[in-house]
Amino acid sequence: MVFYSVPLGKLVRRVSRLRGGGSALPGLVVEKIDPGFMRRTLATLPHGVAVVSGTNGKTTTTKMVVELLESQGLRVFTNRTGSNFTRGVAAALLGEVDWRGRLDADIAVLELDEAHAVHFVNSVPPKYCLLLNVLRDQLDRFGEIDKTAQLLQHIAAKTTGTVVLNREDPRVARIADTLTGQEVKYFGLDDSLLGTFPNDDDMRAAPGSPAPAGLPEKPAADVVLRKVGADSAEFEYDGGTVTTAMKLRGVYNIFNAAAAMTLARSICGAGAATADHATLLEALSKVAPAFGRGESLTVDGQPLDLVLVKNPSGFRLGLKSFAAGGYATMIAINDNYADGRDMSWLWDVEFDSLREGGVDALTGSRAYDMALRLQYDQVPVGAVETDIPAALAAFIREGRGKPKRIFCTYTAMLAIRRELSKITTVEVVS
Amino acid sequence: MNPAEAPTAAAPSKGTLRVVQLYPRDMNIYGDWGNALVLQRRIAWHGYTPELLEYNVGDPFPDGVDIIVGGGGQDSGQLIIQDDLQARAGQLKELAEDGAPMLVICGLYQLFGKFFKTRTGAVIPGIGILDVETQGTDERLIGNVKVSTTEFGEVLGYENHSGQTTLGSGVRPLGTVAKGTGNNSNDGHEGARFRNIVASYLHGSLLPKNPAIADFLIRTAAERKFGSFSPGAPDDAYAVLAREHAAQRPR
């Protein structure tokens, strides 16, 4: 059975691509007929597997780690299609292996959804893991935030080499206490920047009320983000600070650059390559955001920014990072399974920053929930149209000559990209 | 459509209503803030002056409370507030018996009951204002919910809980579940009503899409404080449409 599973899986992949189908089906097929395929293939990698997980920033961070390692001459396998479920990894592997099932890479860097990461590490213990944060996201799937932290802890426990943790997220940093054999490294943030990262616990706290039990004393971090400029950032590592240009926007993306640097330095330090910091920094300065993560397209000669919003902290950071002034604004809220069905999260975001300019258009299956939310924050609302293609066309027509910004949930973003691809060049991910 | 306006200088306030959020620091998940915000705005839209206060563990308990609103929390949040809540049980009970309107959602609904028995058998005492008991389970009840009620019409929300609550004879259910599960997987009831307390598992947040419940709390508070309530005219066009669309969404 094993002998024909790879050719068969590859065939299914080709057929399903021709049909324009989803990226996970061939993974499902190979998983069914050859459950050992993924473990066996990944076991051949000389430097093992690195797993990136957490609520926010997985895709961009994974992309950064890959580009950093490639700058050091490593051949990296990754699940680039954004299908961050185990099945998606199997599907991506099928695309990369030769017909005999061999993978031509030094290391795998995989982005995994928290719950799926648990299944994955049970089958393939990673050598490295990078745990970004635990925030409220799709709690209707995982239950509660403390439960999500337990999922991350399990990933760390199954890791055989180095665990990289966010020093500033108490639920993530505390995972260190539960580990025994692994090497632990932290990435950190300058105290002056902590205020730009409201966490869920601080969300509605009274002024001056104490933060929930953090770490009694902050451990030293391998890489610390010290300052963020308009298009640059200052990092501290190895006892010195360096300033580098950045293409990435938004403090949260740049904080994840510190995470990516820490993981890349660990992997290189473990002998996979010799870290050359000049080329590492150059690679870092060139990283562009992953699709939908603050990417800018051009429509009618004007920029159109897509900002993915999946949870309250992400939405708040998005509103904070991208000033509303001068932009036509649309918000697209869907409640499909991948978005999370519960709309409660919209009530944990403050929309005051949009009050002055108002919101030009609302769309998505829950456009009216969003309209209601904005009414209670006294933000003027323009058009409300649940049908995304119709709403997008009107938004572009009426916002002619103005830069535009669309805040959108995951499936709303896919729909918007599909529509935009008809009028501009967009990388379509299905 | 522009957001409805607060009372202007030309229309003097009909009086102040003081809303107290119970434990927003530790019992605040799934948009519970939405309920407090809706009360704050609608009080103003009805021509009264809202005053929104927070009560957290260790704070002095505010005087002259007109409306209490409390939310859900994680297990860790429930442990943090447990002792403080017991210490305040007398005051809260007095307010409840005196007819103060209250909204308690999910975690605080459970703790306003007699007890919460966890899966492992540990018993977390409640404050016994509501004649209800809750049993922890391994099954999480998650999804959109539609409830038929006699008082508030159709109530829409989203449930996400593993505790199952059984009502005693001292309370009546908020309503009967038309979609979703509600209090427990057996009797088809959702929430509880006792005096002017509305208790429910529903997030969503509950009040934005169910203005009838918000206005019940505000009317009751005004009547209790001023002897009568003269409503304003909040613009509920978006609430009506949000309800229509939400009602069509899958579980």
Image (spheres, coloured by chain):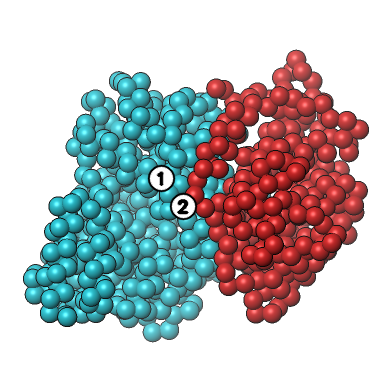
Q: Earlier in the sequence, mark 1 or mark 2?
A: 2
In percent of the image, x 21 and y 44: which residue is there? A427
Quick one: A90 or A19, which is closer to the camera? A19
The answer to whether residue A422 is visible is: yes
Quick one: A73 or B241, which is closer to the camera? B241
Question: Along the horizontal axis of the image, is A427 left or right of A400?
Answer: left
What is the quadrant of residue A304 in the picture?
Answer: top left
When the figure is inspected, residue A186 is found, relative to residue B174, above or below; the finding is below
Q: Which residue in the structure is indicated by mark 1?
A: A409
Determine the secondary structure under disc 2. loop
Question: Along the horizontal axis of the image, is B185 left or right of A169?
Answer: right
| Quarter of the rendering occupied by the N terminus of chain B | top right
Question: Along the horizontal axis of the image, is A11 left or right of A195?
Answer: left
Q: Do the residues labelled 1 and 2 touch (CB within 8 Å)?
A: yes
- Residue A149, image x, y percentages: 49, 68
State how many labels appear.
Answer: 2
When the figure is inspected, residue B98 is found, relative to residue A211, above or below; the finding is above
Q: Residues within 10 Å of mark 1 (few under 14, many from 20)?
A: many
